[in-house]
Amino acid sequence: MIELIATRGYEAITVRELSATAGVSTRTLYERFGGAEGSKQRCFLTTFDGLVEGAVQRIAASRVGERDWREHLHDAFTAFAQELARDPNASRLVLVEALGAGPAGLERMELLSVQFEAMVSSCLAQAPGGAAVSPLMVKGIVAGVMRVARVRLMNDRPEELPALADELLEWALSYRSQDSAQLESLRRIPFPPASEPRAERPAPAASNSGGGEQSASENTRLRILRSAAELAAHEGYQALTSERIVSAAGVRARTFSALFDDEQQCFLEAFEILGEQALRLADRARRTSESWPGGVYRAVAALMEHTARDPVFACVAFVEIFVVGPPGLTARERVMEQVTADMFATARTDRELGPRESELPIQASVGAIWGVAHHHIATASVKSLPALSGELAFMLLAPILGASKAAEAILAEHTNLMGSSNV
């Protein structure tokens, strides 16, 4: 299984290939994994479970001994990075390919994250004065580390990970501060709702010519994309077919074929348009602030509000995109890179904020807020996201400004917003 996935990917392999590579008959494979229906997935999940169990045991063993909390956490981060670099093919199966193995794969990834969250929390709880890191921050830390690891696995650079362990640890510890606790008060007085209506799903654009074939073709394309997004959100990406999209959009099959290669291309284009619309809303909100930290807070709050108000965007952008597998992860990365470009352009050039010697903290921080959002959407808690905007903005700002200045800037911006909304 590991060998085949490394060369062809989970989606492409067949039971026949799997049994031939393993040197057994398809009948034997069916008997071992519960029959013909679903045997490939069950074999994959069994492999996943075995790999994770061994890795978790080795990482836990690295923390044995009379050492202080910081050394234990350092050992865990180092062991995790070394584990991923030790067997890149197995690591890709767990952190990349598993996401394309359907709901069961996503569930396994969620459980893996919970295990690592417990490990990080255990180390932090041993620190003098207690953890000083909320469960929400711990969830963000693990999501950020996972993103950094996944990007390097996807780009065939797993050998870089062990050398990044110390920097990842320092990034994670930037959240260890009592200052972040002040931001929990914003859950009771969340960011004022935006006055503008939410962005529509992929929708017809205005025509410069007032009509014509080009405009009609573009409107048809956008209607198809809108239908694909809504179908995927309501019934899941795995239920998406070109036939169902055609029926929902009210177009002919040949029209669909002329515009898209298949349902995957159609879905990914719908995802990208939804992402662009959401990021435009966030960027407009960012530009209304007079300060860079305040703009980051406004952008995060606008994005979380939009996510909570638009269930199609939330489901497609944070859940169903995973089910596509590696192509979906690549598209997801492009959106997160755009978030980085929009929100951190000032931080990269402002001398008062200090030179950015490494992009890793920013990459991890964006992964952190994306991971927290994914968790709340996957667990039907999406409506609570706007109230978490202050803490999510803190995840972006603390590694750059320091925890105290980040919390102060967010609270000040929130006060300004509440005052202006009451005028």
Image (cartoon, helix red, strand yellow):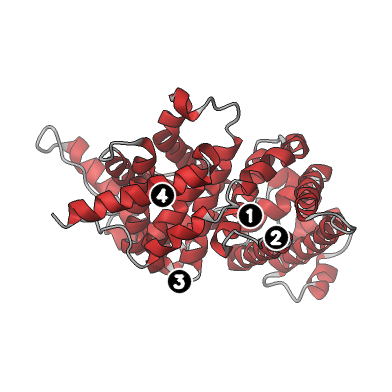
Quarter of the image that includes the C terminus: bottom left
**Mark 2 vs mark 1, CA separation in Å:** 7 Å
- Extreme residue toward the front, this view: 129
The answer to which quarter of the image holds residue 100 is bottom right
**Mark 3 vs mark 1, CA separation in Å:** 20 Å
Mark number, residue 116: 2
Q: Earlier in the sequence, mark 4 or mark 1?
A: 1
**Mark 3 vs mark 4, CA separation in Å:** 20 Å
Mark number, residue 380: 3
The answer to which quarter of the image holds residue 53 is bottom right
- Find numbered disc 4 in the image and state the secondary structure of the residue it sits on: helix
Q: Residue at x 70, y 46 (%)?
A: 8
Tell me whether the residue at label 4 lies in contact with that at label 1, contact meaning CB atoms closer than 8 angstroms: no
Decide if residue 301 is on the left or right side of residue 27.
Answer: left
Tell me whether the residue at label 2 lies in contact with that at label 1, contact meaning CB atoms closer than 8 angstroms: yes
Q: Residue at x 85, y 70 (%)?
A: 28
User: What residue is disc 4 on?
Assistant: 271
Q: Amino acid at mark 4?
A: Phe
- Find numbered disc 3 in the image and state the secondary structure of the residue it sits on: loop
Q: Is residue 292 visible?
A: yes
Q: Earlier in the sequence, mark 3 or mark 4?
A: 4
Q: Is residue 332 visible?
A: no
Mark number, residue 326: none
Q: Amino acid at mark 1?
A: Val
Q: Is residue 88 above or below residue 391?
A: above
**Mark 3 vs mark 2, CA separation in Å:** 22 Å
Quarter of the image that includes the N terminus: bottom right
Mark number, residue 142: 1
- Find numbered disc 1 in the image and state the secondary structure of the residue it sits on: helix
Q: Earlier in the sequence, mark 2 or mark 1?
A: 2
Q: Is residue 170 above or below residue 353?
A: below
